[in-house]
Image: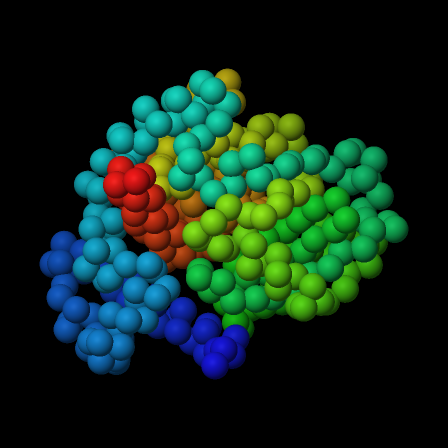
Amino acid sequence: MEQSPLQSHREYQQISQAMAYLVDHQQQQPELKELAEDIGLSESHLQRLFSQWAGVSPKRFLQYLTLQKAREQLFESRSVLELAYDVGLSSGARLYDLFVNIEAVTPGEAKAQGDGLTIHYGWGITPFGCAFIATTHRGICQLSFCEAEQQQIPLEELTKAWPKAKCIHDDDAIRPLLTQIFSQKAPPKQALSLWLKGTNFQLQVWQALLKVPSGNLCSYQFLAQQVSSANATRAVASAVAKNPIAFIIPCHRVIRSSGALGGYRWGLDRKQLMMGREAVLAEQNNQYGESA
């Protein structure tokens, strides 16, 4: 029986709470029993639920939360990323390579403020909680995460960005799109098109983010070097923070050079869940590739 959105969101909140506990107590390396007692679930239920959402057990996920692990990933990613940028492509682990087309909003289109434009939008449950998505005939123009009690916030952002557009709520229309985006086991069946409004610099940063392979991390400084602005780390961080397309444009893969997570506009718990899940999937893909 398919779960209701409310049930799915409740489970995500429990996993988010579990992740927060692991972050706060990572130095103590808590056992499953301690975690289950804090969340108020049985050990077996928590283990099953956590593995369902994160793709890995709490113990395994805890390994990806330590500062040392983040530093290791950052170091290990560098050679992969350098190769990715040299050849213009990232590794096979990146599900959306060659499957994302970006088109920029023209100055004239931006000035029109959406006059004559129809935007379909809706909400859905993903492995990372409730998501809001808006799409036009040109492509996806917004994808963000929200809490159940704050679902109107992304809609307000949409209408502010496109005040003259005709916005139509249609969850049924956007549900297949969310399924395509968040499938973790196969590339999309068709290319995803993004229609983005931003400055030339922001667009360059967002394009550069698309080259960061799943399971890899990069620093803000490294990203700045890729857009020929080695001394503009703060500007790059600002562009990353203003990314309008969550997950597809993977701003969650950017951390500080020290290995610290940095910020994430949709919550650090969600960022850690994405990083941990992708790291595990990349490791599994590598093991499969080696045994094939």
86 versus 240 height, above or below: above
Q: Residue furthest right?
A: 116
On screen, 39 above or below 201? below
Locate residue 54 relative to residue 116 in the image: left or right.
left
Q: Is residue 151 visible?
A: yes
Quadrant in the picture for residue 205? top right
Q: Nearer the viewer, residue 89 or 289?
A: 289
Please state if 63 lies on the left or on the right of 125 as rendered: left
Q: Look at the image and name its color scheme.
A: rainbow
User: Above or below — where is 218 with respect to 277?
Assistant: above
Estimate the x, y position of residue 220 in percent, counting from the top left: 41, 32
**Image location (x, y in percent) of residue 146:** 53, 63
* Circle count: 0
Whether residue 146 is visible here, answered yes or no, is no
Task: Check the image and report above or below for 175 versus 222.
Answer: below
- Residue depicted at 55% across the width and 59% down the height: 179
Instruction: State the image coordinates of residue 177 (x, y, percent, origin top left).
Output: 62, 57
Give the residue furthest to the front: 292
Q: Residue at x 56, y 54 (%)?
A: 180
The picture places residue 183, in percent across and down from the top left corner, at: 49, 55
Q: Residue at x 20, y 51 (%)?
A: 63
Q: Is residue 219 left or right of residue 7?
A: left
Q: Quadrant of residue 38?
A: bottom left
| Quadrant position of the C terminus in the picture | top left
The residue at 14%/54% (across/down) is 27
